[in-house]
Amino acid sequence: MPKTHRPLRAAKTLLQIALLLTMLVVFIFVAMSVLNRNADVNAEVAMVQEQIDAEAARGLEIEHQAGHQHSRSFIEDIARRRLNLAYPDEIIFIMVD
């Protein structure tokens, strides 16, 4: 190969290396962005799952309370505390401070 083509070939090789390095940097940047976004999404999914679990537990508690509201002990408790009622044969003691 003549000597005049060597500098042109070297410049072309350097340009190809620079282009490959640029593409590599862009690829790494995009990959890091995707990984960061993936971590954010995973954190959000975990947070939403915690909310779902909390609401499920709350739903079970509400179901338990709904079943308890029809029991005799619940009705007696409400009559005593809120309505100040007692059975006819009961003696009520009132504590005075």
Image: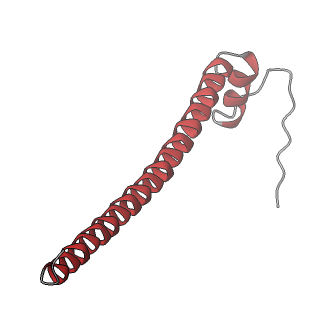
- Quadrant of res 25: bottom left
Q: Which quadrant would the N terminus be assigned to in this image?
A: bottom left
The quadrant of the picture occupied by the C terminus is: bottom right
Give the left or right position of residue 24, taking residue 67 as reference.
Answer: left
- Residue at 34% across / 66% down in the picture? 24
Residue 41 at x, y percent in the picture: 43, 50
Quadrant of res 56:
top right
38 to 56, vertically: above or below? below
Residues 84 and 54: in front is: 54
Along the horizontal axis of the image, is 63 left or right of 97?
left
x and y, in percent, of residue 27 in the image:
33, 61
Q: Nearer the viewer, residue 31 or 92?
A: 31
81, 36: nearer the viewer = 36
Q: Nearer the viewer, residue 10 or 1?
A: 1
Residue 19: x and y in percent read 24, 70
- Residue at position x 62%, y 27% from top? 60
Q: Is residue 47 above or below residue 26?
A: above
Q: Residue at x 23, y 79 (%)?
A: 10
Q: How many marks?
A: 0
